[in-house]
Amino acid sequence: MGAGAVVVSGELAEVERFLYLEARLLDGERYLEWLELLTEDVHYWVPGVENRNRKDPEGPVAPGRMAYFDDTRLDLERRIRRFTSDTAWAENPPTRHFHIVSNVEVEPAERDGELRAHSVTIVHRGRYEANEDVLYARREDLIRRVGGELRLARRTAILAHNVLPSKNLNTFL
């Protein structure tokens, strides 16, 4: 949010409730309900982060480089089918997810009916007795009103890690 940006009056609480609902659905592995929160043209992007000099014009994150997620709705549906299938041996027993969403800011987007939301998320993942990791990310979301309801149209999640602290990334940020 730029200096002097106008926060849309009354929208902050609604967007926070939307993001908290999303976190609760993901924690409960209620993936089909989570998909209902997404637009048909959703783009979900979690790029890899590179350590680069400040003067490097490409910066630490750029399209076209490695990404953990660079997904359309169809890609997300495929991931969910894989997570929930009987052949997903890496998810049996399931991973325990705990999403914490904080630092939510909301501003108008370029188009009517859309909002830009900035937030920070912490995702704690636990498996078995002692297998745990924590992921930290800054997010920028484009949230669109569809039929009077908020829907996630774009997510960019920038991990704090340039080396993933997990054996896999079987969670949404």
Image (spheres, helix red, strand yellow):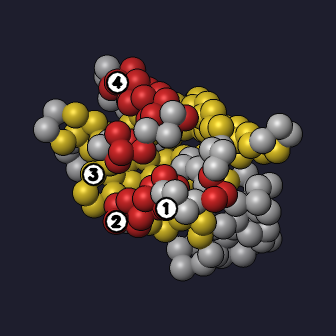
- Residue 14, which numbered label? 4
Whole-Å distance between the Cαs marked 1 and 3? 21 Å
Q: Amino acid at mark 4?
A: Glu
In percent of width and height, residue 129 lies at 83, 37
Image quadrant of residue 37?
top left
Whole-Å distance between the Cαs marked 2 and 3? 11 Å
Which type of secondary structure does the marked residue at label 4 adopt?
helix
Q: Is residue 88 left or right of residue 38?
A: right
- Residue 74, which numbered label? 2
What residue is shown with label 3? 39
Q: Is residue 125 left or right of residue 69?
A: right
What residue is shown with label 1? 82
Whole-Å distance between the Cαs marked 4 and 2? 27 Å
Q: Amino acid at mark 2?
A: Leu
Q: Residues within 10 Å of mark 1 (few under 14, many from 20)?
A: some
| Tag 1–tag 4 contact (CB < 8 Å) | no
Whether residue 171 is visible to the viewer of this picture, yes or no, is: yes
Chain-order first, disc 2 or disc 3? 3
